[in-house]
């Protein structure tokens, strides 16, 4: 999810040498009073852009030593909503590769509009020119919100389930393992997808899902998120010895 309550123009897209467009610099910088900050010769606006956030994420994951693949940038032209997603695995020297993470966030139409046209620009959609000058939104600092979502894939589908009751023990095992990485009140939710084919019951999906709310009041700790994902990915292969899936 993503939303905003206003902010100011976007910076040019960043580029990561290893992953092409959408890669970039380290964390979102704390903007100075002037409304922009300069990094490595590039000016970054006080209001973050989609390109900046996706670039920061990719660079943080890369620096953590994670393998990043299938990076995608989706755009809904009719409304300006954008979506980032990628798949993350441990490096090839740390098998098995079947355990991976799908990471994504949505950059909604309002964020796109404000990043493109500036703080208070959305008020122009609802006011006449003379009324827009007096709208208090022009004096407010817009505050974006983005929900970064991670889906940890914990097993291959197709396992034939002989006793539905055993799922509860699977969930408990996963939660105990991930408790080493996530706090109790912030532990990922475990999801099990089941398909019934006549008298056969198959497990089609077994994942743990987690999200981080980025409010940009402070620069998001994307490096910390990358380290948390790395630690969790190194732990989940232990499930191979504890679960049949």
Image: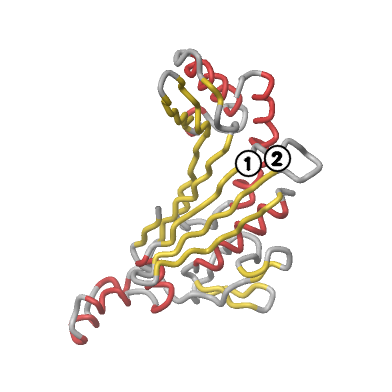
Q: Secondary structure at mark 1?
A: strand
Residue depicted at x 23% and y 80%: 132
Left or right, 96 with reference to 1: right
> For the residues marked 1 and 2, what is the alpha-carbon distance in whole angstroms?
7 Å
Q: Residue at x 48, y 34 (%)?
A: 186
List the single residue furthest toward the front: 198
Q: Secondary structure at mark 2?
A: loop
Q: Which mark is residue 100?
A: 1
Locate residue 92: give its quadrant: top right
Q: At x 74% / y 49%, what residue is drawn?
A: 65
Q: Position of residue 203 (x, y in %)?
A: 50, 27
Viewer-proximal residue, 9 or 100? Answer: 100
Q: Which residue is mark 2?
A: 97
**Hey, which residue is sitting farthest bottom in the picture?**
130
Nearer to the camera, 29 or 244: 244
Q: Residues within 10 Å of mark 2 (few under 14, many from 20)?
A: some
Q: For residue 182, what is the image quadrant?
A: top right
**Between 107 and 11, the one nearer to me in the picture:** 107
Image coloring type: secondary structure
Marks 1/2 in contact by CB < 8 Å: the verdict is yes
- In which quadrant will I find the C terminus? top right
């Amino acid at each position: 999810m993503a939303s905003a309550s206003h902010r100011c123009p976007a910076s040019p897209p960043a580029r990561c040498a290893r992953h092409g467009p959408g890669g970039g610099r380290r964390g979102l910088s704390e903007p100075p009073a002037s409304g922009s900050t300069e990094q490595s010769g590039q000016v970054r606006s006080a209001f973050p852009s989609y390109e900046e956030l996706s670039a920061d994420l990719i660079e943080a994951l890369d620096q953590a030593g994670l393998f990043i693949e299938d990076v995608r940038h989706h755009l809904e032209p009719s409304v300006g909503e954008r979506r980032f997603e990628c798949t993350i695995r441990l490096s090839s020297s740390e098998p098995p590769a079947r355990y991976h993470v799908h990471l994504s966030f949505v950059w909604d139409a309002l964020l796109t509009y404000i990043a493109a046209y500036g703080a208070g620009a959305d008020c122009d959609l609802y006011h006449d020119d003379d009324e827009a000058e007096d709208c208090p939104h022009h004096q407010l600092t817009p505050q974006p919100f983005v929900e970064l979502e991670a889906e940890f894939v914990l097993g291959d589908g197709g396992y034939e389930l002989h006793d539905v009751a055993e799922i509860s023990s699977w969930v408990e095992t996963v939660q105990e393992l991930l408790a080493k990485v996530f706090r109790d009140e912030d532990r990922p939710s475990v999801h099990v997808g089941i398909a019934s084919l006549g008298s056969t019951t198959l497990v089609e999906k077994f994942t743990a899902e987690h999200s981080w709310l980025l409010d940009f009041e402070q620069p998001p700790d994307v490096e910390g998120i990358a380290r948390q994902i790395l630690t969790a990915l190194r732990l989940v292969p232990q499930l191979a010895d504890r679960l049949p899936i």
